[in-house]
C-alpha cells in the first residue's frame, strides 16, 4: 500500500517489480544458474502479446489464440528492421517444433539476444498437433526468472491496476518457484 501512495502518478499504469538478491551461488557452474518460468495466478495486469511461428498444420488454432501468426512461407520476408519491430511488439513467441531450425535461421539473430527465442522450458515449442488455447492462456500469465551473470533476480509481478492481495499472491507464487529452483 505504501508503494502506491508514495509513487508519483503517471499517465500510464506503472508496474511492480520483484527484485531478489541471492547469496552463495557460483554462476560459473551451470547447475547453479537459475532459469525458470513462474505462472502468476493473477497475471501481470496487462495481457502479454503472443506471436506464433507455424505452418499450415497449426495455422488455424494459432490465428484463433495468438495475437499474430507467421506462417513458414513468410519467414524469409522479414528484414532486420521488421524483426526488431516484432521483438518490441510481442512479449512471447511460440514455435512449432519441426520449424525450429528455420526459426533459428531467420529469427535467431534478433530474438536470441533479446531473450525472446521460443523456450522449451516455458512450453513455447509445440508439436504440429498441439492445442494452443490452454498454452496461450498460461503463457499470458508467465514471467521468466533468470540469473543473468549476477546474483539478482528481477521480474514484473503486476501493475497498479491489480489489488494489493493479488500482487501479494503473485509475489508468493514467484518466490515459491524461485525457492524450489535453487540448488541449495
Image (spheres, rainbow, N blue to C red):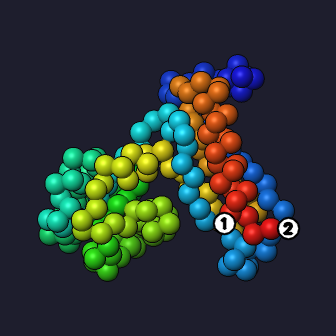
Image location (x, y in percent) of residue 22: 79, 59
Name the residue rendered at 79%, 74% in the picture: 26
Q: Classify 31 as above or below 128.
A: below
Q: Which is more toward the observer, 172 or 87? A: 172
Q: Secondary structure at mark 2?
A: loop
The residue carrying mark 1 is 34
Identify the residue under disc 2: 24
Q: Position of residue 92 (x, y in %)?
A: 41, 55
Q: Secondary structure at mark 1?
A: loop
Where is residue 4 shown, x and y percent of the image? 67, 23
Q: Residue at 34% of width from left, 66% of height from top?
A: 126
Report crowding for label 2: few under 14, some 14 to 19, many 20 or more residues within 10 A (C-alpha): few
Tell me if residue 65 can be seen.
yes
Sequence-first disc among 1 and 2: 2
Tell me: residue 27, above or below residue 71: below
Front residue of 20 and 181? 181
Number of labels in the image equals 2
Quarter holding residue 128:
bottom left
* Image coords of residue 178 (percent x, y): 69, 56
Amino acid at each position: 500500500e505504501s508503494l502506491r501512495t508514495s509513487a508519483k502518478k503517471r499517465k500510464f499504469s506503472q508496474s511492480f517489480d520483484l527484485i531478489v538478491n541471492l547469496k552463495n551461488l557460483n554462476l560459473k557452474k551451470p547447475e547453479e544458474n537459475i532459469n525458470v518460468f513462474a505462472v502468476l495466478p493473477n497475471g501481470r495486469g496487462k495481457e502479454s502479446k503472443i506471436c506464433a511461428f507455424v505452418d499450415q498444420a497449426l495455422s488455424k488454432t494459432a490465428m484463433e489464440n495468438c495475437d499474430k501468426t507467421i506462417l513458414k512461407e513468410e519467414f524469409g520476408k522479414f528484414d532486420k528492421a521488421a524483426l526488431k519491430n516484432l521483438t518490441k511488439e510481442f512479449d512471447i513467441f511460440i514455435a512449432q517444433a519441426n520449424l525450429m531450425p528455420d526459426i533459428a535461421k531467420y529469427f535467431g539473430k534478433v530474438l536470441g539476444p533479446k531473450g525472446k527465442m521460443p523456450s522449451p522450458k516455458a512450453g513455447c515449442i509445440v508439436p504440429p498437433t498441439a492445442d494452443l488455447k490452454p498454452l496461450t492462456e498460461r503463457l499470458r500469465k508467465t514471467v521468466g526468472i533468470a540469473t543473468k551473470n549476477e546474483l539478482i533476480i528481477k521480474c514484473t509481478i503486476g501493475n497498479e491496476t491489480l489489488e494489493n492481495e493479488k500482487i501479494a499472491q503473485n509475489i508468493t507464487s514467484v518466490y515459491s518457484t524461485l525457492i524450489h529452483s535453487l540448488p541449495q
